Amino acid sequence: MKPFLLCAAVLLAACSKAPEPASAPAREPAAAPAAANRVTLDAAAQKASGVAIEVAAQRALPETIRASARITNDENQTWRVGAVTDGRVIRVLAAPGDFVKAGQPLARIHGHDVHDSRALYRNAQTELMRATANVQYSAKARDRARRLYDMKAGSLEQLEHAEAELRNSEASLATARVEVERTRLHLVEFLGVPEGGGHDHQPGAESDDADLIPIRSPAAGVVIARNITPGAVVTPSTDLFVLTNLSSVWAIAEVNEESLPKLAPGMPVRVSVQAWPGQSFPGRIGRLGEALDPSTRTVKVRVDLPNRAGRLKPEMYATAEIQVGASQPAVFVPEQAVQEVRGQKVVFVQTAPSAFEVRPVDTGQSLDGAVEITRGLRSGERVAAHGAFVLKSEYLKAALSGE
């Protein structure tokens, strides 16, 4: 029995020592994670690749309210132009997209008011001539009555009657002058046609511009709508053209009900649109809506936006960030310092002149070309900003070669 027990002990000892060589390879990859989040790039290569280092800075992050918005015309700089009288459109001189000056004709219409007003004007001129002649006659009669009275050949009653007739004639002359000016202003200022014209117009012939009522632009701007064509019959209640001055626009934001107490006119707002990524347009709250939308429980907020370059267009979708105050300081890095590796946002933190740590981070709001780092980075740490994509490429190449 003893030899059998001795052999069993030897076999058990051999079995317990056999797994030791196999355990060594299992411990080797333990160093890999420590090296897997590093990338090395010497100073010469950094300079050649344009890698620039910046310090993560601490800034006061404004508390903002984000809301969807829509760009619209500035209604204070928008004009709906119609006809001043009934008529038929003869010529259309402007199209959507045209820039027009103040007073520029947009269309010309034919209306009977032109001929009626010219007839009234000529009648007023005739009455003025008659009144002028009456004054001249009454003045001579008064002078004759005065001479006769001075020579004791006429009575005082005759002189007073002549003077009364002269005063009546002068009053009629003043009335005639007012009527001439009134009818002239109706032609020239209201209808926009010259005093003369229409004498030689033949039936069926094309109307001359002097006989057509112009529809003029009230201000300089861009035509955004045209609602007429030649031959159309129009009335004063019809909007024929819509013009707007795009040097300023509105952004109508829809803000949630719970954010309403934080808002006030004059607060700064930054608006961004898809057409200009990475760029925001500054504005201010112009007015708060008076009622909530019953279906979305939002209130409309009007944001006044300068638009001198004309890059913002009506009906663009936008995002409005309303700055309602300052929160606790936050860490910011340039936007180009944040890269994405395998679906995770990272920054490259410089740990030595030629060594960088790949640091996973969480980001927050963007502000003036910088992005907030909410987790993974401390203020004062040095990160690769310009050229961070070069370090990303080196890191991915190293990772692929390691696989």
Image (cartoon, grey):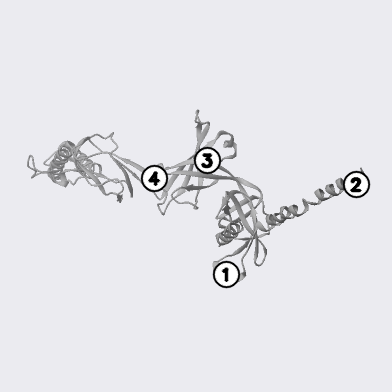
Residue kind at label 1, given as amino acid type: Lys
Rate crowding at label 4 as few (under 14), some (14 to 19) or many (20 or more) other CA atoms within 10 Å.
some
Q: Is residue 243 left or right of residue 299?
A: left
Q: Nearer the viewer, mark 2 or mark 4?
A: 2
Quadrant location of the N terminus? Answer: top right
What's the mark number on residue 203? none
Residue at image mark 2: 3
Q: Is residue 296 above or below residue 220?
A: above
Mark closer to the chain start, 2 or 4: 2
Residue at image mark 1: 47
Mark closer to the chain start, 1 or 4: 1
Element under label 2? helix
Residue at image mark 3: 67
Q: Nearer the viewer, mark 1 or mark 3?
A: 1
- The residues bearing labels 1 and 3 have C-alpha atoms spaced at a distance of 42 Å
Residue at the extreme top: 294
Q: Nearer the viewer, residue 360 or 299?
A: 360
